Amino acid sequence: MPGTITVSLHKLIFRAYHGLYPEERKTGNDFEVNLAVQYEPADEVVTAISSTINYATLAELVKKHMLQPADLLETLAMQIADDIHQEFPQVKHIDISIAKLHPPIISFQGNVSVRYTCSY
């Protein structure tokens, strides 16, 4: 029974201090992270947490990076993906998006985001 499994985390919300500008580092912003991690299970049927990608561990990896200020969301997304692949080398594909919910742009309504995908 060949196939892949995707483990996803949706709408993780963080208050963080990412950005190029001093005001962003001082006042912070709200961010939303969405993540999908795909792998091929080694077992025909996954019956143990050790045979899958633990979503609690994924959430902790994301949280660790969200708490460390970065200038660019691109950098942040790439670092998160790299850490996930180091922790779970069986991962074949990662899709991560990080949205800044209240960007400091005059007369702008909406949010901005970066999406990073990579395959191994």
Image (cartoon, grey):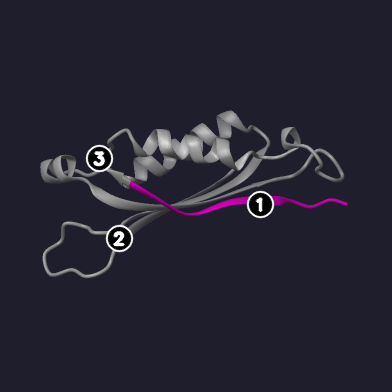
Q: Which amino acid does label 2 sit on?
A: Val
Are the two marked residues, 3 and 2, in contact with CB atoms closer than 8 angstroms? Answer: no
Question: Is residue 120 in view from this perspective?
Answer: no
Q: Is residue 78 shown left or right of residue 71? A: right
Q: What residue type is labelled 3?
A: Asp
Q: How crowded is mark 1: few (under 14 residues within 10 Å), some or many (20 or more)?
A: some
Q: How crowded is mark 2: few (under 14 residues within 10 Å), some or many (20 or more)?
A: few
Residue 62 screen position, x and y as percent:
45, 39
Question: Would residue 2 be counted in the magenta stretch?
Answer: yes
Q: Is residue 98 shown left or right of residue 85? A: left
Residue 66 screen position, x and y as percent:
36, 39
Q: Which range of residues does the magenta coloring cover?
A: 1-14
Whole-number angstrom distance, CA of label 2 to CA of label 1: 25 Å
Image: 59 above or below 50: below
Would you name the residue on which mark 2 appears? 112
Residue 3 screen position, x and y as percent:
79, 52
Rendered-image quadrant of the C terminus? top right
Give the SS element for disc 3. Answer: loop
- Label 3 vs 2, first from the N-terminus: 3
Q: Which mark is residue 71?
A: 3
Q: Residues within 10 Å of mark 3 (few under 14, many from 20)?
A: some
Q: Is residue 24 shown left or right of residue 88? A: left
Residue at (87, 44) in percent of width and height: 44
Q: Is residue 46 shown left or right of residue 91? A: right
Question: Is residue 16 in view from this perspective?
Answer: yes
Q: What residue type is labelled 1?
A: Thr
Residue at (33, 35) in percent of width and height: 67
Would you name the residue on which mark 1 appears? 6
Q: Residue 78 carries which label?
A: none
Whole-number angstrom distance, CA of label 3 to CA of label 2: 15 Å
